[in-house]
């Protein structure tokens, strides 16, 4: 009887200790699915300090690159859902890729998003030498023929953005009425417009901010409802194109789909605190980003809506990449 009581008491003690153990007890691995120096990497490393302070444990930043963000995403998809391996998800890896690529090794349902915290407005821009001053001028030139647009590659956000903007402004078949010129990265896409290889591009405002500031590129549209600081251009709301509000870049944080509720709730609280950090907000705003904290529920709704918008466009235009 005494031995039985001893084991019973020990079992209760072990269970009580386990119950008292609170997440997180050790450092958390934060997977960045893109390379050093890119938009996702900059966003992740800028928020790392205030986020680490909110979490109270070290955050181990790891770049796991490849396949347009898919390699790092799969790394988190297959991780144990205990909150110790989390992903800096991005518009490319979790909106554009699922909408455009048939052979992607994951779907949105394989992840649980705990927040979206950064919005990157998309802006369309041309050079002063183009003679294009607004969207009406651009569409007129498209209808006349000979217009090209650059992107960071086939199946990229920039590729989809150029087609989506033209379609929303009445171009019935933008894939044939304007010629897509893919480049090796966003910087090369901007350079293609600067040197006259391409007529225009639509990309994240942060990638255009310096070119716009020094007058090398002229913005003719921003896809947000509100004006973007530093961009003297009409918004999609000004031009009555509300569908384009979904055409934005973003950064968020996600875990595997079976991430526990209590872990997701903690991440929501941590990110709410971290995104109020004045230094973080100032640095990201200077780069053209809009810091907009979303709760887990808001983040999932936002991403689902954006994905469905992109998928509809991809299906309508036959942009689905099967290989």
Image: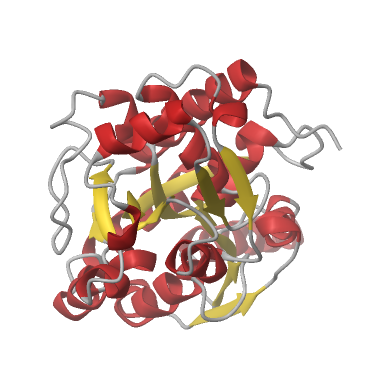
Depicted 148 relative to depicted 308: above or below: below
Rendered location of residue 229, percent (x, y): 13, 61
Q: Residue at x 54, y 23 (%)?
A: 313
Pick the residue in front: 144 or 258: 144
* 131 to the left or right of 162: left
Quarter of the figure with residue 7: bottom right
Number of labels in the image equals: 0
Quadrant assignment for the N terminus: bottom right
Residue 256 seen? no
Quarter of the figure with residue 223: top left
Q: Which color scheme does this rendered protein use?
A: secondary structure
Depicted 243 relative to depicted 163: above or below: above
Q: Residue at x 66, y 44 (%)?
A: 155
Depicted 46 relative to depicted 308: above or below: below
Pick the residue in front: 235 or 1: 235
Quadrant assignment for the C terminus: top right
Rendered location of residue 221, percent (x, y): 25, 44
Depicted 164 relative to depicted 231: above or below: above
Pick the residue in front: 96 or 130: 130
* 181 to the left or right of 90: right
Rendered location of residue 179, percent (x, y): 60, 40
Q: Residue furthest right?
A: 323
Residue 307 seen? yes
* 229 to the left or right of 310: left
Q: Residue at x 46, y 68 (%)?
A: 39
Rendered location of residue 124, percent (x, y): 34, 49
Q: Residue at x 77, y 32 (%)?
A: 102
């Amino acid at each position: 009887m005494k031995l039985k009581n001893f084991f019973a008491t020990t079992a209760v003690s072990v269970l009580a200790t386990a119950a008292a153990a609170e997440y997180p007890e050790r450092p958390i691995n934060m997977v960045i699915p893109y390379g050093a120096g890119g938009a996702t990497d900059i966003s992740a490393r800028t928020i790392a300090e205030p986020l680490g302070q909110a979490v109270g444990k070290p955050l181990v930043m790891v770049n796991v690159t490849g396949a347009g963000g898919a390699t790092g995403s799969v790394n988190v998809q297959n991780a144990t859902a205990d909150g110790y391996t989390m992903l800096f998800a991005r518009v490319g890896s979790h909106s554009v890729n699922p909408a455009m690529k048939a052979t992607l090794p994951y779907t949105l349902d394989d992840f649980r998003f705990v927040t979206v915290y950064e919005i990157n407005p998309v802006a369309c821009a041309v050079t002063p030498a183009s003679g294009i001053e607004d969207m009406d001028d651009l569409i007129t030139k498209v209808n006349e023929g000979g217009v090209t647009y650059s992107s960071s590659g086939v199946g990229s956000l920039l590729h989809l953005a150029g087609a989506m903007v033209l379609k929303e402004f009445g171009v019935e078949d933008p894939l044939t009425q304007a010629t897509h010129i893919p480049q090796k990265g966003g910087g090369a896409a901007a350079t293609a417009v600067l040197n006259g290889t391409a007529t225009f591009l639509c990309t994240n405002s942060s990638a255009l901010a310096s070119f716009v500031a020094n007058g090398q590129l002229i913005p003719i549209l921003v896809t947000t409802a509100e004006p973007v600081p530093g961009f003297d251009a009409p918004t999609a709301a000004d031009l009555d194109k509300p569908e384009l509000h979904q055409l934005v870049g973003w950064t968020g944080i996600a875990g595997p789909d079976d991430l526990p509720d209590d872990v997701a709730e903690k991440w929501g609280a941590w990110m709410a605190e971290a995104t109020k950090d004045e230094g973080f907000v100032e640095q990201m705003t200077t780069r053209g980003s809009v810091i907009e904290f979303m709760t887990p529920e808001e983040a999932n709704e936002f991403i689902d809506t954006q994905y469905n918008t992109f998928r509809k466009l991809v299906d309508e235009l036959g942009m689905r990449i099967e290989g």
